[in-house]
Amino acid sequence: MSARDAILKRLRERADGPLSAPESDFSVVTNRGWSPAERLARFERWITSVHGEVIHTAQADWTQALAKVLADKGVRRLGLGREHPVAAEARAALADAEVELVDADRDIEGWQREQFDSLEAGLTSTRGAIAETGSLWLWPTPDEPRRLSLVPPIHIAVLDAETLEDTFFDVVEAHGWAGGMPTNALLISGPSKTADIEQTLAYGVHGPRELVVLVRHAEEVE
Amino acid sequence: MSVETFTPREFHRQAHDALGNPQIRANFRKAMDGLMSKRSDVFSDWDLETLRELGANIRLRALARLPDLLEQLEANCQANGIRVHWAENGDEACRIVREICQSHDATSVIKGKSMVSEEMHLNAHLEKAGIEALESDLGEYLVQLNEQTPSHIIMPAIHLNTDEISEILHDKTGTERSRDVDYMTAAARSQLRERFMAADVGISGVNFAVAETGTLCLVENEGNGRMTTTVPPVHIAVTGIEKVVEHLRDVPPLYALLTRSATGQHVTTYFNMISGPRQPDEHDGPEEVHLVLVDSGRSAIYQDDELLDTLRCIRCGACMNHCPVYTRVGGHTYGTTYPGPIGSILMPHMMGLEETRDLPTASSLCGACGEVCPVKIPIPDLLVRLRRESVGEGRGNVPGAGIKRSMKEVAAWKGFQWLATHPRAWRGSTALAGKLEALLPTRLGPWTEYRSAPKPAKTSLHALVKRHQTRKPDGEERS
């Protein structure tokens, strides 16, 4: 008998007989009822508590905010997609800027070393965010591949304020994740970190050292 | 630093050594105190009991449907392009992993943290086949450089302090001696980035495997898990058969419990959900994803209604952080892959009670482990059950059951039982014991190693009460 069949047989022929499965009540992880303002405040409080930076910008001026972040951090090579409106608008706005735009929608085999060694920041869109934990959620695509939010030392993520939801459970339910998952789905809550050296927190161990979230608001900010 | 091998057979000697080592005691005390207070802070605004109830309930439901869910997981993973393998034990799982590596002519493997791979002794197995396996979790990396094993399931290098780590990195990798944690972290980052690029295969564990969607969930902070599962062309995930959950919606409550219970974090930096290899239109990610499902004694635990609860575990480590024994003796003392209370109820099934006979007694039964367990495993009850099994008073469902049974002890308890149920003989013998006090033994095996022997009073309580009663006239009310 194969290992598979032997294991399943033992589980099915359980000595103490079949087990009954309890029903689950999920209300403790949903129904927060936060207003948009509360949601945003919570998101910002949590993500900044783990060294995420949040920059608010009006929808119309977001590329100026991006340009300022790039200038402030001295980014000269920015990896980004092409088709997603975030990437397309950034490309248009940064066409004449100092920063070199690096196409991320290329087969990795051709530019792995370049990606690891010379990319200073990666720009990605996000699908939304979670107020309760200060988490962004991303489904990488061929346009914005998995490594764009992982390998460069700085990850710049663009979030639309109205896509914030209360809890992870709410996101999974509202967007029907169970009906079709992408090859890779991610929650990102801050820059990479470790506490493996005597519980001392250090940022940027394997992934990005910095995470900047550009929160775009439909209305003017300030 | 001297490298020591630990074994559960030597628990008492190892515990004695650890208790006499002020460095080990200070390192663990500091870390565990921090973890306990962080955990209680992060749950402060939660209805923790309701959340634990839900966590326990989700795990129980998964176990109740385990064979069906494993088949569903397999079918959905396969539909997503993930290849599924089954292994009866660690050796078989090692062989499967090695053969996958060899089919790709792999010589270098990068690993994300996986306790199941520790349980299988995968690194040693691969090494023998000429395949280098390098740990990439910073704590695991340090422990591997120091030729040790993890001393905690979440924080593998918790037994080392900053100075010791600085020395290890200096000795093994040539970095400067420095107490600067950022410097050491950056050094490890650049060393490991080269290795991620060069690795032929990435090997990870799994925190939750979702049957409904064929999704493998990985919880981490460092990004090494994402690197391991994204950069090399082949990803192999190894996990125990109990890690499956039924629905995707079961994941958020368990994730909320896991990060808060483990390190007192409201969330980890990354939650990585993998549902398939790189697709034709994708530009990165592994070309192949494999899932190895390992039994290693789990289906035997599954047979018994009481022992089954052991399989609810989501490997947060809160039981060790709160255990007065673990906090004092540290993780290596146990000599097993999983130390602390969870190890003491799990390892006897994996290694047998002969090897692990001391582990179920490595507890004062204070109950802290059961109280903090996010999925409400009655750990103290299971410790007592394993104690019973080891003296042959259980159902005999554990390998090595009855190993500690001694006919002398059985006879002594039989005698006590007879005396205690025969009042006349009891009174006679306690009166006699009082009179012959000087002749009674003062050493009673291990009991008197740390305690003084019981000393019977010259006059027994029974006799005292009787004397007292005869002085008062009957019928008088006493309050």
Image: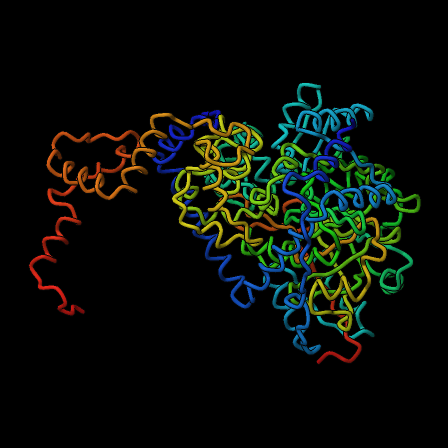
Residue B260 in the image, given as x and y percentages of width and height: 57, 56
Residue at the (68%, 58%) spot, across then down? B252
Residue B231 in the image, given as x and y percentages of width and height: 77, 40
Residue at the (48%, 54%) spot, across then down? B371
Residue B461 in the image, given as x and y percentages of width and height: 17, 49
On the image, which quarter does residue A36 sit in? Answer: bottom right
Residue A134 in the image, given as x and y percentages of width and height: 66, 64
- Apparent side of residue B152 relative to residue B206 in the rendered image (left or right): left
Q: Looking at the rendering, in which quadrant would you find the C terminus of chain B?
A: bottom left
Nearer the observer, B251 or B200 = B251
Q: Relative to B106, is B153 above or below?
A: below
On the image, which quarter does residue A63 sit in? Answer: bottom right
Residue at the (70%, 19%) spot, across then down? B130
Q: Relative to B27, is B149 above or below?
A: above
Give the tally of numbered discs.
Answer: 0
Residue at the (85%, 50%) spot, across then down? A104
